[in-house]
Amino acid sequence: VPSALVSLSNVTDQLASLSFKSLVTKDPYSVLSNWNSNISFCDWNGVSCSRGSQRVVTLNLSQKALE
């Protein structure tokens, strides 16, 4: 897979995650506080990425009282 396509996929994953965050109206435990462009999205709370392509493979935000 060309690196440009991997990079575009990563941007897509990041933007989709930020779009999800924008829909959250309550985050009482500040779980999403590090979801910003200053930190790699693979290091965000609750996000797991594949090792090779750095694509999001799992979001674990259960029992975080997000609304």
Image: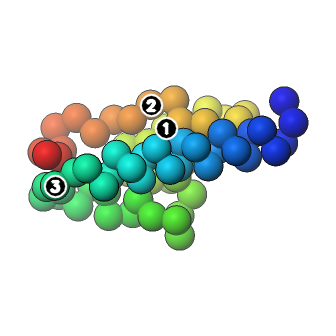
**How crowded is the residue under tag 3: few (<14 C-alpha within 10 Å), some, or many (20+)?**
few
- Residue with the mark numbered 3: 25
Residue found 14% across the figure and 46% down from its top:
67
12 sits left or right of 24 in the view: right
**SS for tag 3?**
loop
Residue type of the residue flagged with mark 2:
Thr
Amino acid beneath label 3: Thr
Residue under pointer 2: 58
Proximity of marks 2 and 1: CB atoms separated by less than 8 Å: yes
- The x and y percentages for residue 36 are 45, 64
Q: Identify the residue at image location x=84%, y=30%.
A: 1
Tell me how far mark 1 sits from mark 3, CA to CA: 23 Å
- Vertical order, 7 against 51 (above or below): below
Q: Which residue is mark 1?
A: 48
- For numbered disc 2, what is the local secondary structure? strand
In the rendered view, tell whether residue 28 sits above or below residue 3: below
Of the numbered discs 2 and 1, the one sitting upstream in the chain is 1
Residue under the image location 51 percent in, 29 percent down: 57
Q: Is residue 66 left or right of 4 when viewed as pictured?
A: left
Task: For the residues labelled 1 and 3, say whether their Cβ atoms are less than 8 Å apart.
Answer: no
Residue 11 at x, y percent in the picture: 62, 49
